[in-house]
Image (spheres, helix red, strand yellow):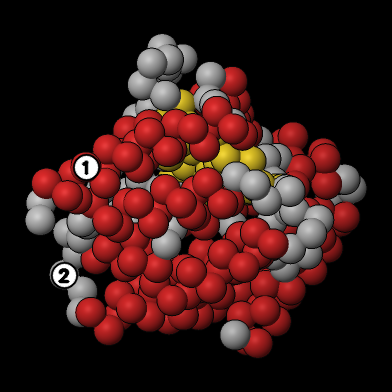
Amino acid sequence: MDDRRDRLRALGELLRRLRKDAGLTGKDLASRAGVTQPTISQIETGQLLPLPETVERLVEALELSREARVELDGLLKRLRDEVSRLKGGLAGRESANAARVRAAHQVASFQSAMIPALLQTAEYARLALSIGRDVDEEAVSRAAAVRVEMQSILFQPGREFSFVLTEGAVRTWPGPASLMQAQLDRLGQASTLPHVRVGVVPWSVQVPRFPLHGFTIFDGSASMVESLTAEQTLTDVDDVRVHVETFDAFARVAVYGEELRALLGRIATEFRQLDSQSK
């Protein structure tokens, strides 16, 4: 881990030197490369490993010499080899996600099919990590433990968390009905935290857009999209803007506070009825 941090810092120092040699400010480079200014700042301070397409944009914007490009490529290869080793397995992937959350001050998550990782109970997390995957139970348990431990960040001051879910996400149950009663209680509790905002878009409301997939936005400068087999982090200005606009559109029609908790209570009653019918 120390090697990775050292290499990330070295990458940041190299990018800063190349930018200054080109006579550009961080804002200038971001504009030329078509990425956000916070993305440049996070790379230069050793907080972000850029995607290959972001690197290509930076190389083009900086008009690097062949020697500088070789130096940059060598450092990036060593970094990616280290990241690949660390991210092996479910627990490694969860640890990488936790590090990303800890590095952010503002996190906004929209989900249309499942509960966001930061709000999952331990049992829900275990099922979310295992369903449809050929993984052993021990690996799932380790990954779920990392995911749940990450949730302590919700109680740290100086951060802002916004969650918007569709009612469909709240009603999708990966386990027994009793599991969802505990999960709904968890959502209600999280909604009372001072710097956490939880909203649900009811089925009774017309949606502003088709919720094709969920995503999580970090500091308004990067958005992570999770698929069945991988995760993709988007940093392109236009991509991030679309995600921010989509999040805001759903946030405007969601219910919050007492209205949210009343909705969760009605759904919990239905799950209790389902639970009693199954016995």
Q: Is residue 264 visible?
A: yes
Query: Which is more N-terminal, label 2 or label 1?
Result: 2
**Residue that numbered label 2 is attached to:** 134
Image: 195 above or below 168: below
Rendered location of residue 193, percent (x, y): 68, 51
Residue drawn where x is 40% and y is 54% of the image: 183
Q: Which quadrant: the N terminus?
A: bottom right
Task: Describe the element under mark 2 as helix, strand or loop.
Answer: loop
Q: Which quadrant: the C terminus?
A: bottom left
Where is residue 85, by image quadrant?
bottom left
Q: From the viewer's perspective, is 69 left or right of 130?
A: right
Residue drawn where x is 78% and y is 64% of the image: 45
Rendered location of residue 100, percent (x, y): 60, 62
Q: Nearer the viewer, residue 139 or 242?
A: 139
Q: Amino acid at mark 1?
A: Gln
Where is residue 133, by image quadrant?
bottom left
Q: From the viewer's perspective, is 196 left or right of 200?
A: right
Residue 35, numbered label:
none
**Residue that numbered label 1 is attached to:** 273
Rendered location of residue 246, percent (x, y): 52, 25
Q: From the viewer's perspective, is 216 left or right of 66?
A: left
Q: Amino acid at mark 2?
A: Asp
Q: Nearer the viewer, residue 120 or 229?
A: 120
Task: Describe the element under mark 1 as helix, strand or loop.
Answer: helix
3D distance between C-alphas at marks 1 and 2: 32 Å
Report crowding for label 2: few under 14, some 14 to 19, many 20 or more residues within 10 A (C-alpha). few
Image: 45 above or below 51: below
Residue drawn where x is 27% and y is 56% of the image: 178
